[in-house]
Amino acid sequence: MQTIHDATARYIRRGYPLSVFDNAVRQLKALDIHVVAHMILGLPGETPDMMVRTARYIGQSGADGIKLHLLHVLSGTDLAEEYAAGKFETMTLDAYISVLEECLRVLPREMVIHRMTGDGAKRSLIAPMWSADKKRVLNAINRRFLSDDLEQGSALPV
């Protein structure tokens, strides 16, 4: 799915409206097939609030799990050209973890978190370069989650 926001979906050329995701989840669940949605954090033009709204939507969609990804700018892509032209910035590690925490707080406790970050191929990664050091990223996420006493679903009504 990547995002619930139409303007962003057009920008990334997702190629289908949100209703296709909704229908797919319903049809797969009717067949008792587990559904895992993908979401990209840091898409150009999206605010932290927009990202949290996407996470909340996924949490209410009926999906069983989620994979949260960080936007990577890779060489040889249209996105790389726009990044080089200064049309957008990628997230800092601190900003990423902050948004990640807010997203997890609005996801149901029973939803399986399959991924909290991803890595682009180092040979073609342009930005953010901090994402290439996976051990550092995972350690930073772990430290913040512990210090902030993060609890999945804590922002949802009981």
Image (cartoon, grey):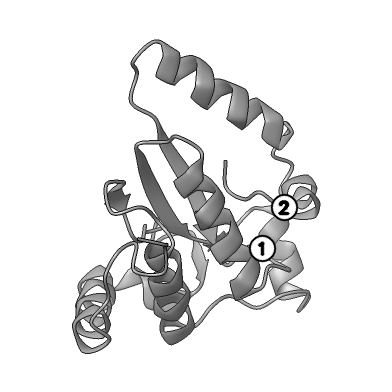
Q: Nearer the viewer, mark 2 or mark 1?
A: 2
**Label drawn at residue 126:** none
Which mark is drawn over residue 80?
A: 1
Q: Is residue 44 left or right of residue 58?
A: right
Residue at 42% from the left image edge and 86% from the top image edge: 94
Q: Position of residue 137 (x, y in %)?
A: 29, 75
- Decide: few, some or many residues near mark 2? Use Cα within 10 Å; few <14, some 14-19, many ≥20: some
Q: Secondary structure at mark 1?
A: helix
* Earlier-in-chain disc, 2 versus 1: 2
Residue 101 x, y percent position in the rendering: 38, 73
Q: Is 80 situated left or right of 145 in this image?
A: right
104 and 110: which is toward the camera? 110
Q: Secondary structure at mark 2?
A: loop
Residue 71 left/right relative to 117: right
Q: Disc 2 marks which amino acid?
A: His
Residue type at tag 1: Ala
The x, y position of residue 155, in whole percent, is 41, 69
Q: Which residue is mark 2?
A: 5
- Can you say whether 17 is above or below 71 in the image? above
Q: Nearer the viewer, residue 158 or 95?
A: 158
